[in-house]
Image (cartoon, rainbow, N blue to C red):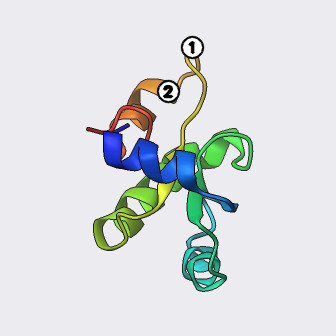
Amino acid sequence: MTSRAATRAREATTLLFVPGDRPERFGKAMAAGPSLVVLDLEDAVAPERKVYAREQAVAWLEENPECAVRVNAAGTAWHDEDLAVPGGAGAR
């Protein structure tokens, strides 16, 4: 996570988590006005939809880089690829 993203996350007073496989909810979440919208690739997404969720998060983040991403845990099949997502724990 970049220092700017880390600061934003640390200073956030409200976090709104949105399932990464529900892109129709991303804009609605932003419009709700939380301190930080978090696109969730982990618990909110069924295993068979993980890749789709990652693709949707990447597409959204291209135009909306102020969001954060919750990645899958280390040791899972999706973790390493999640770290490459802008806004994810491995983002620079």
Residue ID at (64%, 43%):
48
1 vs 71, nearest the viewer: 1
- Disc on res. 9: none
- The residue carrying mark 1 is 75
Which quadrant would residue 60 be assigned to in this image?
Answer: bottom left
Quadrant where the image shows the C terminus: top left
Q: Secondary structure at mark 2?
A: helix
- The residue carrying mark 2 is 79
Looking at the picture, how far across and down is residue 89, in whole percent? 44, 34
Mark-to-mark CA distance, 1 and 2: 7 Å
- Residue farthest along the left direction in this orientation: 92
Which quadrant would residue 46 be assigned to in this image?
Answer: top right
Q: Secondary structure at mark 1?
A: loop
Query: Mark 1 touching mark 2, by CB under 8 A?
Result: yes
33 vs 24, nearest the viewer: 33
Residue ID at (69%, 62%):
14
Residue ID at (37%, 71%):
64
Looking at the picture, how far across and down is residue 49, in whole percent? 61, 49
Q: Is residue 90 above or below residue 35?
A: above
- Residue farthest along the top direction in this orientation: 75
Q: Amino acid at mark 2?
A: His
Q: How many numbered marks are there?
A: 2
Which quadrant would residue 15 be assigned to in this image?
Answer: bottom right
Q: Is residue 15 above or below residue 44?
A: below
At label 2, counting other C-alpha atoms closer than 10 Å, the crowd grade (few under 14, some 14-19, many 20 or more) is some
Looking at the picture, how far across and down is residue 10, in whole percent? 55, 45
- Residue farthest along the front direction in this orientation: 11
- Can residue 64 be seen here? The reply is yes
Q: Amino acid at mark 1?
A: Gly
Looking at the picture, how far across and down is residue 19, in whole percent? 66, 58
- Can residue 20 be seen here? The reply is no
